[in-house]
Image (cartoon, rainbow, N blue to C red):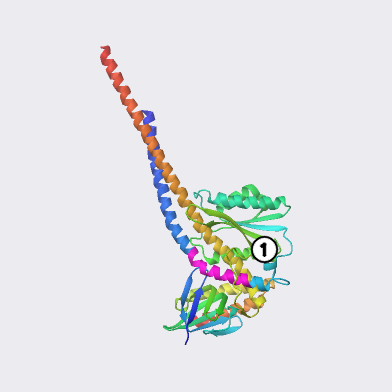
Amino acid sequence: MANLKVLKNRIASVKSTRKITKAMQMVAAAKLRRAQEAAEMSRPYTERFNAVMAGLAASAGGEGSPKLLSGTGSDNVHLLVVMTSERGLCGGFNGNIAKNAKAHAAKLLAAGKTVKIVTVGKKGRDSMKRDLGDHFIAHVDLSEVKRIGYDNAQDIARDVLGRFDAAEFDVATIFYAKFQNVVTQIPTAQQIIPFEAPEGAEADDSTLYDYEPSEEAILADLLPRAVATQIFAALLENGASEQGARMSAMDNATRNAGEMIDKLTIQYNRSRQAVITNELIEIISGAEAL
Amino acid sequence: MADFKFDLVSPERRLAQMDATEVQIPGADGDMTAMADHAPTITTLRPGILTVTHAGGVEDYVVSGGFAEITGTGVSVLAEKAFPKSEATAEQMEKLVADATVAFEAAKASGNGADEADMVRNAMVEVAAAVA
């Protein structure tokens, strides 16, 4: 009988787990829609911005251009900005980003470069600190932030630019997951300093622009903003990816829980039947013995 | 008057997309008004009020940081902060002025770009006064 009781409890507990994962999946689905909308809204800005930046960088680059564009002249110290989520239970999302960043770091270290790591999001911090604790320099906490805004990206950009001005690093790369669809998120590394136009940003050089105040002044004004813009775009992509990953992870969990319940129920019914059969045998053999 | 396309976007949303006849832009070197067939120009923005005139009337927006891209057929304004002037509140403006002041103090302390930051701060104070 004890066995039956245990089984019954097991079933009840898996059932409540299924309820929780189901609820989490639905919450993630709702959040995913909002995150996708936010990413959608920012797209006109990012696209125009990158197109203009690509044009400017192509024409104003060269001798004497700002360091943010041409680099410091060396590439010995690399800053890796690893962006992950604040919460777990989202499948391989954080693990994949961290793995990508670690592989990148390992390659740089093998080439004799210095690596510095800044993390955004608690999950990545834990993972990066465990393996590359010596290189860890700072963490940006977004756990209090309900909705990612441009201000958050600006704060991160300001921190990164401050370190760049203080000559703490030569090259900065951000790591995040690009949202493809609910089941696929692509871990991506993107260099933000020196400025590199993201893929797909086409400069239309058909128009010759007048620049006010001057091409150089505009470039100097826009380069720091480009860093913030790229970080913002990455944060939004990451937000959508996180919810997508959580949604599919929770969907799997719900399905697994369902299978487990079926299996346990069959087991429960079998052992209940066995107990009944046993009792019958006892009664019948008792009666026969008389 | 000929119409042209006008776009105002901030990183977080698209604020306006319409056909306009005239757009007054607070450029870094001074206000400029763009109309159809304007020479292609890119200008950075100072904090200020952007005025759009279109068939249905006139609209004012508070913009700060970013740039405007003017071509013969359209104007795109990419502003880091932008909202309709009618939605601006005193607290919001105070915060923007405070932020600009903090940025100015920081720039002064680092001895880097203090003049620009000062200009931004002054422009911000002016905008705040205009909104209030």
* Outermost bottom residue: B1
Secondary structure under tag 1 reads helix
Residue A16 visible somewhere in the drawing: yes
In the image, A273: left or right of B14? Answer: left
User: Residue at point 53% right, 51% down?
Assistant: A93
* Outermost front residue: A206
On what subunit does the disc labeled 1 rest?
A: A
- The part of the image, by quadrant, that contains residue B121 is bottom right
Specify start and end residues of the magenta stretch as a single range. Answer: A39-55
User: Residue at point 30% right, 19% down?
Assistant: A282
- The part of the image, by quadrant, that contains residue A222 is bottom right
Q: Is residue B1 magenta?
A: no
Is A218 drawn above or below residue A268 in the view shown?
Answer: below
* Outermost top residue: A290
The spot of residue A11 in percent (x, y) is 38, 38
Is A193 drawn above or below residue B1 in the view shown?
Answer: above
> Considering depth in this image, is A196 or A68 the residue closer to the camera?
A196
The spot of residue B28 in percent (x, y) is 60, 80
Is A41 drawn above or below residue A290 in the view shown?
Answer: below
The spot of residue A15 in percent (x, y) is 38, 42
The spot of residue B104 in percent (x, y) is 62, 74
Q: Is residue A53 magenta?
A: yes
**Magenta stretch secondary structure, dominant:** helix
User: Residue at point 69% right, 53% down?
Assistant: A108
Q: Quadrant of the C terminus of chain A?
A: top left
- The part of the image, by quadrant, that contains residue A209 is bottom right
Q: Count numbered badges in the picture.
A: 1
* Residue type at tag 1: Arg
> Considering depth in this image, is B64 or A237 the residue closer to the camera?
A237
Reading the image, the residue beneath label 1 is: A163
Q: Residues within 10 Å of mark 1 (few under 14, many from 20)?
A: some
